Image (tube, rainbow, N blue to C red):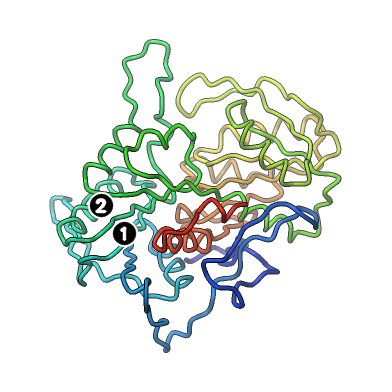
Amino acid sequence: MAMAAGASYCACTSPSTSLAHLPRRRMVITCSGGGMYGSSLLSPLPQFPATAAAPARGGVGDRLRIFSGSANPQLAHEIACYLGMDLGRVNIKRFADGEIYVQLQESVRGCDVFLVQPTCPPANENLMELLIMVDACRRASAKTITAVIPYFGYARADRKMMRGGRESIAAKLVANLITDAGAHRVLACDLHSGQSIGYFDIPVDHVHGQPVILDYLASKTTISPRDVVVVSPDVGGVARARAFAKKLSDAPLAIVDKRRHGHNQAEVVNLIGDVRGKVAIMVDDMIDTAGTISKGAELLHAEGASAVYACSTHAVLSPPALERLSGGLFQEVIVTNTVPVVQHQSFPQLTVLSVANLLGETIWRVHDDCSVSSIFQ
């Protein structure tokens, strides 16, 4: 993935650990113990020479297939690299009238198929493509079909928001569409709210990108654990920020009190907690227009914070997010590659971390009928 000068991209998620000596299905992410953050998380992606064939898929793995949609092929490639296999061959094209055509170019009969396709912008295009890919696998007699959705679009439409009512709950509708298309399982990363899991009538494996960000922060020698305060940009994100703070050696917590007047419109009211002289780490599940997080950063600076870091799993970055994030409010903006960050979206403060190892390990455990939750114990 091309990045502009000044921005950084981390294909690895841990600078200090390696899984090369461990059986793949024994990889464990832990956030307790010694060290600044007590984390021993993910390893760099294993390197497979371009001229060498991928490791043979003997035994259980010979029935595992991974296909990528067009939304984030780079992430899918990194996942396949972690698993030591090639992406499945698929032909995806658009007709002149915009309709989507999908043809699998290899047999998936009796296979466990994993389709990597975030429903990021353009959300409707990518969602429809995912549904058609699921249908193609179902008609090709795949044994199981897992929709790997690193970023689940429409997740914010999970309840009625406006006082007048008469709104759709699109998260439930999309869950029904994926299920009815023929998916047997969903693998998602950092859903906007945990209740969205209940919208699916099929199993959902919900993984979290926080360990990847925590491991990156643990590698930074410029941040002292005594100076850190974790900040939730709104009341709704308190549980997420509290869990993050607990893994940061029980760092103190602050909350930005926000009032939302409409979609993508927020007003910061005041700050709950003390940030004076502290390094404030703002934690959210996604950055869309960056209105909430940038207004929160302004308040943190006004309250005496020495530096502000923004951490988020999903970098949606809708306009005018780039102008807000690169305007000098943030020391660093740390995101993951669940949503592809293209070259024109880069700026010097941006760091993109890869969740490929995390998703790859989860895929292997699902395929091998092993525990997924034990990854995070």
Where residue 62 sits in the image (x, y, percent)? 33, 74
Judging depth in this view, the residue of 284 and 293 nearest the camera is: 284
Q: Are marks 2 and 1 in contact (CB under 8 Å)?
A: yes
Q: Is residue 35 above or below residue 120?
A: below
Question: In the orientation shown, which residue stands out farthest toward the top?
Answer: 164
> Position of 120 compared to 346: left or right?
left
Where residue 147 sits in the image (x, y, percent)? 34, 52
Q: Which residue is mark 2?
A: 129
**Cα distance in 3D space between marks 2 and 1:** 7 Å
> Position of 111 compared to 260: left or right?
left
Q: Is residue 262 above or below residue 77?
A: above
The numbered dot on residue 300 is none
* Disc 2 crowd, CA 10 A, few/some/many (<14, 14-19, 20+): many
Where residue 318 sits in the image (x, y, percent)? 46, 42
Q: Say what secondary structure mark 1 lies in.
A: loop
Task: Please name the amino acid that badge 1 sits on.
Answer: Gly
Task: Please name the amino acid that badge 2 sits on.
Answer: Glu
Where residue 296 sits in the image (x, y, percent)? 66, 32
| Image quarter of residue 75 | bottom left
Judging depth in this view, the residue of 4 and 235 nearest the camera is: 235
Judging depth in this view, the residue of 375 and 314 nearest the camera is: 375
Q: Which residue is mark 1?
A: 69
* Disc 1 crowd, CA 10 A, few/some/many (<14, 14-19, 20+): many
Q: Which residue: 66% across, 20% down? A: 269
Question: In the orientation shown, which residue stands out farthest toward the bottom?
Answer: 51
Mark found first going from the N terminus, 2 or 1: 1
Q: Say what secondary structure mark 2 lies in.
A: helix
Q: Which residue: 42% across, 82% down? A: 55
Q: Which residue: 41% across, 24% down? A: 159
